[in-house]
């Protein structure tokens, strides 16, 4: 209901006939407002629209700092932004999409992969992308990651993508090291992998792994932490 109301308001405010336009324009503001309400809950403050507007205005200071210091938010993909499996979604899930990956493993034929976006991921990418430069850094192969990101991020708010060949092999898995990426600015990693966070500390934050919980609220919580981190 709230999303539909926002689209209705945006169509009349901006005269746009395409509901997707108003959704893309205004949903980041709704996400920021929801983060504000969550912060108010933590601090025991009353809910108010004023609080939502304050946090939107407050991000300008962070935007200026991000531009000055070239702040880059580096996002993991699997179990941070999405949860994937093949070939079918679990019963009762409706928020998913499928992609065809031409080479899931070396020498393997193509496969259809079920992908479940983490709740609020679209709003998170839009809101974070309005403040920071966004990169994705994944232990997945290029064909797999690109197929998912092309759907997850159709506006190309993620400016660069880095894959398994940029990771460090460790105990039959792969961990991320920001020093292996181009020195484009001050980078900060968001990842569910504790080893990757440990290697890149203090320029990293651990997020709870996402494994399909439709009630997951980690991204709004993490975004509020990022705002507080860069506001201080």
Image (cartoon, rainbow, N blue to C red):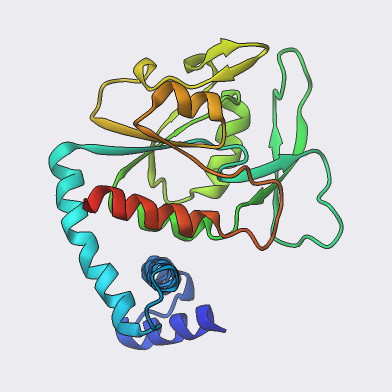
Seen at 76% across and 39% down, the residue is 85
Which residue appears at 37% of the width and 67% of the height?
32
Q: Quadrant of the N terminus?
A: bottom right
- Name the residue at the right extreme: 91
Identify which residue is drawn at 48% across, 86% down.
5
Residue 126, image x, y percentages? 40, 56
- The answer to whether 180 is drawn above or below residue 67 in the figure is above
Q: Residue visible at 50% across and 17% down? A: 167
Can see residue 50?
yes
Q: Horizontal and vertical percent for residue 216?
A: 62, 58
Counting from the top left corner in percent of width and height, residue 137 is at 47, 29
Looking at the image, is 219 positioned above or below residue 150?
A: below
Q: Can residue 130 be seen in this view?
A: no
Q: In this view, does 132 lie to the left or right of 69?
A: right
Vertical position of residue 82 compared to residue 58: above or below: above
Image spot of residue 41 (x, y percent):
45, 73
Q: In this view, does 65 lie above or below 91?
A: above
Considering depth in this image, is 158 or 46 the residue closer to the camera?
A: 46
Residue 127 located left or right of residue 5: left
Count of marks placed on residues: 0
> Which of the two residues, 78 or 191, is positioned nearer the viewer here?
191
Give the farthest residue toward the front.
44
In which quarter of the view is residue 102 placed? Answer: top right
* Near-viewer residue (143 or 184): 184
């Amino acid at each position: 209901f709230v999303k539909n109301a926002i689209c209705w308001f945006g169509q009349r405010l901006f005269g746009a006939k395409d509901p997707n336009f108003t959704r893309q324009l205004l949903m980041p503001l709704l996400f920021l407002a929801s983060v504000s309400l969550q912060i108010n809950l933590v601090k025991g403050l009353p809910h108010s629209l004023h609080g939502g507007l304050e946090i939107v205005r407050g991000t300008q200071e962070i935007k200026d700092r991000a531009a000055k210091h070239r702040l880059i938010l580096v996002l993991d993909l699997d179990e941070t932004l999405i949860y994937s499996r093949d070939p079918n979604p679990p019963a009762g899930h409706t928020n998913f999409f499928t992609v065809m990956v031409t080479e899931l493993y070396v020498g393997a034929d193509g496969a259809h992969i079920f992908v479940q976006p983490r709740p609020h991921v679209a709003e998170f990418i839009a809101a974070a992308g309005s403040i920071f430069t966004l990169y994705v850094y994944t232990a997945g192969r290029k064909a797999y990651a690109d197929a998912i990101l092309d759907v997850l991020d159709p506006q190309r708010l993620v400016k660069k993508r880095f894959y398994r060949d940029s990771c460090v092999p460790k105990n039959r898995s792969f961990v991320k090291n920001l020093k292996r990426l181009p020195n484009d600015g001050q980078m900060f990693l968001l990842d569910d992998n504790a080893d990757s966070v440990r290697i890149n500390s203090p320029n990293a934050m651990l997020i709870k792994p996402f494994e399909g919980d439709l009630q997951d609220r980690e991204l709004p919580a993490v975004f509020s932490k990022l705002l507080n981190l860069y506001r201080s």
